[in-house]
Image (tube, grey):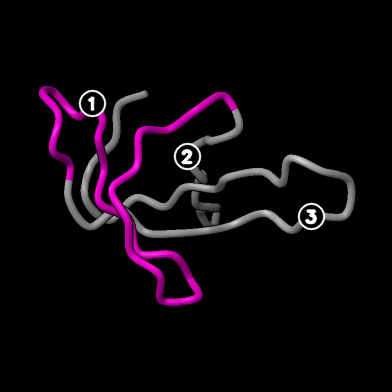
Amino acid sequence: MQAVVGERLVIHGKQVGQADRHGEILEVRGEDGGPPYFVRFDDGHETLLYPGADCELEHQQTSR
């Protein structure tokens, strides 16, 4: 995964009924956009994150 500051990501719930977590990438600490990423989640929690298989970048919808 390669990301830039300001992109958003989602971590999918691991159990049935568990909500997805959404956050904004505040810092990219790896080389060439690679992890780890310093992320602020929508609930205000901040953490250093190495994304796993349950994590993906959110793609912003563009208006036409």
User: Residue 17: within the magenta?
Assistant: no
At 54% from the left and 36% from the top, the residue drawn is 55
Relative horizontal placement of residue 6, taking residue 19 as reference (left or right)? left
Q: Earlier in the sequence, mark 1 or mark 2?
A: 1
Looking at the picture, which amino acid does disc 3 mark?
Gln
Q: Position of residue 6 (x, y in %)?
A: 27, 56
Q: Are marks 1 and 2 in contact (CB under 8 Å)?
A: no
Please tell me which residue is depicted at 49% across the width and 51% down the height of the picture. 60
State the quadrant of the C terminus: bottom right
For label 2, the residue is 57
Number of the label disc, if any, that sits on residue 34:
1
Q: Is residue 29 above or below residue 46?
A: above
Earlier sequence position, callout 1 versus callout 3: 3
Q: Secondary structure at mark 2?
A: strand
Q: Residues within 10 Å of mark 2 (few under 14, many from 20)?
A: some
Tell me how far mark 1 sits from mark 3, CA to CA.
27 Å
Residue designated by label 3: 18
- Residue range in magenta is 28-53
Disc 3 secondary structure class: loop
Q: Is residue 52 left or right of residue 38?
A: right
